[in-house]
Image (tube, helix red, strand yellow):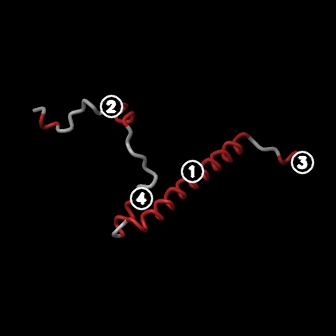
Amino acid sequence: MDNWKITSEELIRLRESCLQSIRDGEIYQLRNDAKLRAVYSSQSYEEFKDIVDAAHLRPVTRSDKANAHTKNRLWNSAARD
């Protein structure tokens, strides 16, 4: 039974594999829920596809906007000249 020892590298790989499986399951569930909603609410395939493709995205919150470092950025560099 000595050959059944698990190395720390194997534990790390197992942990990462389990975490990835959990993430994949969450994404699958989000996309599936979006598909079920989109079947009744979309009017074209493109709209359906957009809803499903954006299922994993979250809306931008006020704190996200406050933490963004783009407030003072000049987007149109030609306006500076």
Q: Which mark is residue 23?
A: 1
- Is the C-beta separation of discs 4 and 2 under 8 Å? no
The residue under label 3 is which amino acid type?
A: Met
Residue marked by disc 3: 1
The residue under label 4 is which amino acid type?
A: Asp
Nearest the viewer among 30 and 14 is 30
Residue marked by disc 4: 53
Sequence-first disc among 3 and 2: 3
Sequence-first disc among 1 and 4: 1
- Is the C-beta separation of discs 4 and 3 under 8 Å? no
- Label 4: which secondary element: helix
The residue under label 2 is which amino acid type?
A: His
Q: How far separated are the C-alphas under marks 4 and 3?
A: 49 Å
Q: How far separated are the C-alphas under marks 1 and 3?
A: 34 Å
- Label 3: which secondary element: loop
Label 1 Cα neighbours within 10 Å, binned few <14 / some 14-19 / many ≥20: few
- Label 2: which secondary element: loop
Task: Give the number of the mark in front: 4 or 3.
Answer: 4
Tell me where residue 61 appears, x and y as whole percent: 38, 39
Q: Which mark is residue 69?
A: 2
Q: Residue at x 13, y 37 (%)?
A: 78
Q: Residue at x 40, y 60 (%)?
A: 51
Q: Residue furthest right?
A: 1
Sequence-first disc among 4 and 2: 4
